[in-house]
Image: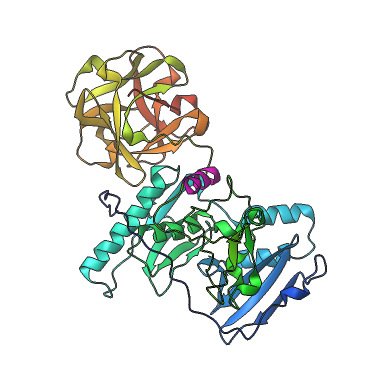
Amino acid sequence: MKRRPLLSLTIFFGCLVFCGACKREIRTPYEDEKAGNEAQYSSHRLNDSTIIHRFVVDGTVNFVNETNGLYYYSDDIVLTPEQFGMLKHLSSHLPTTQRSTITQRFIQTWPNGVVYYRLPVNDGSLTSTQYGNFLRTIDSAFNVIESRTPVRFVERSTQAEYITFVKSTGNSSPLGWSKNRVNTIQLYNYTHPYITAHEIMHSLGIKHEQCRPDRDQYVVVDLSKVEAGKEHNYNIAFDYAGEGPFDFGSVMLYSSTSFAIDSDDPPMTRLDGSTFVGQRSRLSEGDFAGITHLYAPFNTAALTNGIYRIGTPLSSAKSFDIQGGRTDNGTPVILYSNHTGKNQQFLFRKVEHGYFIIKSMVDTSKVLTVRSAGTANGTVVELKAYAGTDAQKWYLYNLGNNGFGFSPKHASSLRLEIKGGQTSDLTPIVVGAVSDNATKQQFVLTKLN
């Protein structure tokens, strides 16, 4: 499998590039809408290439633009045909149980918070410099999302579901995870990490801030001031609530004048009539909180910023230790009574998306390694000089209040564990087959500095 080196975060500034204005010849008659009286589903043709579908779900109006066989929930969110069908069903009079099931399935998150990806291939349309910038942009977007959320990006091997990227004439992404679907993220602004992050967040299942169900408590949206065919950018989401208060600093928020017929007459303002500008230069505190909430519960400690003791819920008095404090290759990693020596101090360093090496502070050139890259239950974990092998790279499963689970990259079906679940001194640290809810495979990280 091709692997990328970790690249440093490079911050670029930019803004979304929106599609050009559509003619204002056909409009949905909003002035005729009466609560409870409007049609639950209707459609009309905007032009030769676009049909506008209108749904009313529990009194909430949503629009989907069908263009060239694709269903756009906003200019940059693409629904699957199945999701489009769900909206149709939700706008009909279904029993409560069926409606609840459909709502739960409408946006699905990535299992275990792991997003598989494939890097774009240069088809010859980019110079080597442009292609390198494209890759760095993707890496930067991954890094910023991973830095403070539980989401992890892992390069695809054989997985059917993954995200990939294509340089295009616009920016768009599918919404959430779907079985057997590749999420192709289209990017016009392929050198802007935070526009890229915005689209990746759609693939994570996140909509726009102005689409929150409670948005009318914070902003005024007047659809009569929106270009014909662009109303879907102001859909009010029916299937989730916003995390925290409305976030005017969110990377997912549009500007007051977005899709305006007249930029001097903005479609969206604060309650007091003042305007605001959407930013694409950072993820806000609310953005990080929203992603974490969606993929919660997780402990989001920044592992790479300190030295940690690796403990076990089996006994708060015991932690990982380097046997005898030796530094030669092959020294076993064991469980031992807590102390303040370097034997029990470990430094986590991310070497690629989703994977860490775990250095011993006794000798930081040595890392925790599965002996001989073994895959048998009970294979010992030892200290060994770092050589970049997959048996030295660990994926961290954040188990929330239950701590972390560790899986070696060379064998994702294995988990780090305390042999036999014993707590006596000198008990070996080994790897074994995944055991759900096994305390012996759960570990607590305590920051020491």
Asked whether residue 264 appears in the rendered view, the answer is: yes
Q: Position of residue 253 (x, y in %)?
A: 52, 58
> Which quadrant holds the C terminus?
top left
Q: Position of residue 194 (x, y in %)?
A: 39, 57
Residue in the picture at 54% in, 61% down: 275
Q: Is residue 103 left or right of residue 156?
A: right
Q: Is residue 49 left or right of residue 442?
A: right
Residue in the picture at 57% in, 87% down: 48
Of all residues, the one furthest to the right in this rendering is 37
Q: Is residue 365 left or right of residue 63?
A: left
Q: Is residue 147 magenta?
A: no
Of all residues, the one furthest to the left in this rendering is 328
Residue in the picture at 63% in, 67% down: 84
In this orientation, which residue lies closer to the viewer: 104 or 416? Answer: 104
In this orientation, which residue lies closer to the viewer: 4 or 19? Answer: 19
Structure colour scheme: rainbow
Range drawn in magenta: 285-294
Q: Residue 102 falls in which quadrant of the image?
A: bottom right
Residue in the picture at 51% in, 60% down: 276
Vertical placement of 174 versus 159: above or below? below
Q: Residue 95 falls in which quadrant of the image?
A: bottom right
Vertical placement of 146 versus 170: above or below? above
Asked whether residue 155 appears in the rendered view, the answer is: no
In this orientation, which residue lies closer to the viewer: 305 or 275? Answer: 275
Q: Position of residue 42 (x, y in %)?
A: 72, 75
Q: Residue 318 falls in which quadrant of the image?
A: top left
Vertical placement of 90 versus 21: above or below? above
Q: Position of residue 334 (x, y in %)?
A: 32, 19
Question: Magenta stretch: dominant SS?
Answer: helix
